[in-house]
Amino acid sequence: MDKLLFGTAGIPISTPDHSTLNGVKHVKALGLDAMELEFVHSINISREKAPEIRDAAKKEGVVLTCHAPYFINLNSLEKPKIHASINRILESARITHLCGGYSVCFHAGFYLNMESEKVYANIRDRIKEMRKTLDDEGVDLWLRPETTGKQSQFAGLKELLKISSEIQGVMPVVDFAHLHARTGGKENTTEEFRQTLLSVEKFLGKEGLKNMHIHLSGINYTEKGERNHLVLEESDMNYKDLLKVWKEFKIAGVVICESPNIEDDAMLLKKTFYL
């Protein structure tokens, strides 16, 4: 991509006759550029419906991403749960691919009081396995483990950048609100934002900066991390300086807004960025 696109985490709230298909059309009507298919509770698009969504997105010029189900732990102690987690991510990727989407976001797992090196190896190897399966099937999109908002969850930015540098076809979802919450209120200054993007460039090169999948919202947190998402203006998220740093680094890709008022904050971010 050659520019930064802005969109909603799911169907915009104001969409008439609430459906994924109408959501795609409404995103365009709002002046936004992207929409994330929210499979967080279940994969709610059938293989039969997917081509219709693909055609609508292509017609409207709306880029589609996806958030895989929340019920995922690639570091589970129970093999059936690992198997189920892998299948949920794979099926999310397959359906997103049929919808014409290009990027699948997922929360990779939990530490479960295990050594961080062991957790890293477990999750890396399972992502590598999924990547091979999708490549063998011709499912050409990005697998994107997301930076998480709680310290009990895998992982922070450096771990995900390292995995991404080791496996072709994998890049992180950089959730700036999660990074802010995970550190108990840090990761919210101009210099910290710069360091985040410098890390992306160090591990993934210029391609990493030109192919970003970002999540942003306001966020409520404690010393243990994320509690819930907030409207940007009702939070301490320093989004104005963040957007200035994005401009400074000339990043491109997709920014998905996860605020409770998804389309309002998505439009606020787009208007502020392109002022």
Image: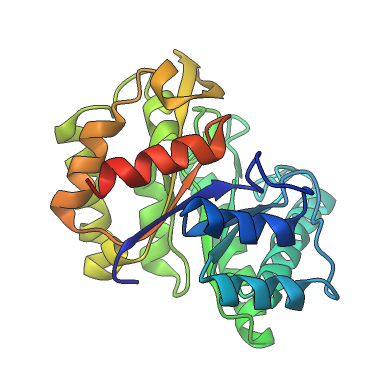
Q: Is residue 210 above or below residue 111?
A: below
Q: How far across and how far down the image is residue 170, in percent?
A: 47, 66
Residue 114 appears in the picture as rendered: yes
Q: How far across and how far down the image is residue 166, in percent?
A: 40, 68
Q: How far across and how far down the image is residue 273, in percent?
A: 27, 46
Relative to residue 30, is residue 166 drawn left or right? left
- Quadrant location of residue 249? bottom left
Q: Is residue 65 above or below residue 187?
A: below
What's the residue at 36%, 57% (across, down)?
Answer: 162
Q: Is residue 256 above or below residue 212?
A: above
What's the residue at 86%, 75% (across, down)?
Answer: 48
- Quadrant location of residue 91? bottom right
Quarter of the figure that contains the C terminus:
top left
Relative to residue 136, is residue 267 drawn left or right? left
Q: How is the image coloured?
A: rainbow
Compare residues 206 and 114 and report the one nearer the observer: 206
Residue 115 appears in the picture as rendered: no
Compare residues 86 and 264 and report the one nearer the observer: 264
Compare residues 104 and 53 and report the one nearer the observer: 53
View extreme (top): residue: 222
What's the residue at 70%, 77% (across, down)?
Answer: 98
